[in-house]
Image (cartoon, rainbow, N blue to C red):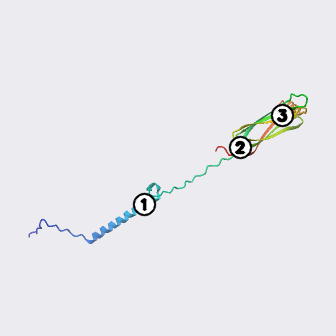
């Protein structure tokens, strides 16, 4: 038996694909399109919520920065002081002049705020209450301040004699006392 021969220019018949294969290809393409759509949607949502991935045409909202306020400095009124005292005698020996009790309190405001300072100095009197002088001053933070006292006493009286008597009976100490009391503050707290 002889096999039939096909003419050379004729097309070779191809087997026909079944409908089942064609349906599978269509379903695969649809699934691929759906998966790609989901991925693109996910990428789009990420760039809207992440400012680092946002494109230039999408608005970026700045988030408020919360920080604690700086602590307010606490007023710290304080200082140091030293005092000295003496007396002067008039050169008028007629008894019509005045002698003087003199003194000084040197303040240094070492705090961080201005202070209102009440100053008190006393001169002792043998057998009598001391002579008292008072004064109020304002000192700024870091300020050195010399508060001077000057009290005129009649030279015909015995104020200077009683002071000298007290000093002689107490080993020639000056005997004066000094006191500084901070009664108030003013201004704003310095430093921080």
Q: Residue 131, percent across and down?
A: 85, 37
Give the total of numbered labels: 3
Left or right: 54, with 155 as reference point: left
Q: Earlier in the sequence, mark 1 or mark 3?
A: 1
User: Residue 55, position in %: x, y?
Assistant: 43, 56
Determine whether the residue tagged by mark 2 lies in a helix, strand or loop: strand
Q: Which residue is mark 2?
A: 114
**Circle 1 Cα neighbour tier, 10 Å, few/some/many (<14 / 14–19 / ≥20):** few
Q: CA distance from mark 2 to mark 3?
A: 30 Å
Q: Name the residue beneath numbered marker 1.
A: 44
Image quadrant where one finds the N terminus:
bottom left
Nearer to us of marks 1 and 3 is 3
In the image, what residue occupies the spot 84% across and 36% down?
A: 151
Label 3: which residue?
A: 101
Mark sitting on residue 35:
none
- Tell me residue 48's x, y (percent): 45, 59
């Amino acid at each position: 038996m002889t096999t039939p021969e096909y003419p050379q220019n004729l097309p070779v018949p191809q087997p026909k694909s079944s409908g089942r294969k064609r349906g599978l290809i269509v379903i695969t393409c649809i699934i691929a399109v759906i998966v790609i759509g989901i991925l693109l949607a996910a990428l789009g949502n990420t760039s809207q919520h992440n400012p680092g991935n946002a494109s230039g045409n999408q608005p970026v909202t700045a988030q408020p920065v919360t920080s604690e306020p700086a602590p307010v400095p606490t007023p710290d009124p304080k200082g140091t002081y030293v005092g000295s005292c003496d007396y002067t005698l008039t050169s008028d020996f007629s008894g019509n002049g005045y002698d003087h009790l003199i003194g000084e309190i040197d303040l240094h405001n070492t705090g961080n705020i201005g202070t209102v300072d009440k100053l008190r100095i006393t001169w002792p009197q043998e057998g009598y209450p001391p002579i008292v002088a008072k004064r109020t001053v304002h000192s700024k933070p870091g300020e050195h301040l010399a508060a001077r006292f000057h009290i005129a006493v009649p030279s015909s009286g015995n104020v200077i004699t009683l002071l000298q008597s007290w000093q002689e009976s107490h080993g020639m100490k000056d005997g004066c006392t000094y006191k500084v009391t901070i009664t108030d503050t003013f201004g704003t707290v310095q430093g921080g």
